[in-house]
Image: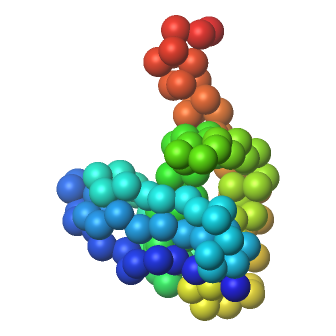
Amino acid sequence: MSSFTDPLTVTQISAGTWRVEREFSYDVGEEGSGNTITILKGFETDFASVPWPASMLIPKSGLYNQSAVLHDFLYSILGEVKTPYNNIKRTRAQCDSIFKESMKILGVNWFKRGTIFNAVRIGGWIPWNVHAQKMRLKNNVV
């Protein structure tokens, strides 16, 4: 079974933004798999990016907070995790599946987990493409 290595520790830095105060990792697939994603201290998140109407069913914050930070991180790097041993480039669908897997690990019930997962599958292309555009601009590729 996959796992988070440490608990989530954050500080609120603005109305909707939080900063990770302690590095943590997530082992994809199963603990010790070697397929590890590390979220560094200083990473900024908004937890779950839930549109206003849906926030009545799914709040921006909940049992899934650590999964939301992991997912935000994966989107911010467009799924490309670099390690000393190799680089792993994941698709958006793979990043979303890791999000779903990690919510299960945290004990998010199947209904809420499925609802959140389906929402990111439907609307996640928007932030994914925003990050892709930022990366292209950063690298002077248009």
Image-based side of 114 in relation to 14, left or right: right
- Is residue 43 left or right of 3 when viewed as pictured? left
| Color style of the picture | rainbow
Whether residue 3 appears in this view of the structure is yes
115 or 80, which lies in front?
80
Q: Quadrant of the N terminus?
A: bottom right
Q: Nearer the viewer, residue 60 or 3?
A: 3
Instruction: Please say whether residue 101 is visible from this viewpoint.
Output: no
Query: Is 66 displayed left or right of 99 in the figure?
Result: left
Quarter holding the C terminus is top right
Q: Position of residue 36 (x, y in %)?
A: 59, 63
Q: Position of residue 67 (x, y in %)?
A: 54, 70
Q: Where does residue 26 sit, x and y in percent of width and height?
A: 55, 69
Residue at the (57%, 85%) spot, across then down: 106
* Depicted 84 relative to depicted 131: above or below: below
**Which residue is painted at 73% across and 73% down in the image?**
29
Give the image quarter of residue 136.
top right
Q: Position of residue 109 (x, y in %)?
A: 67, 90
**At x 78% / y 53%, what residue is drawn?**
93
Residue 8 falls in which quadrant of the image? Answer: bottom left
For the point 55% across and 47% down, the residue is 83
Q: How many marks?
A: 0
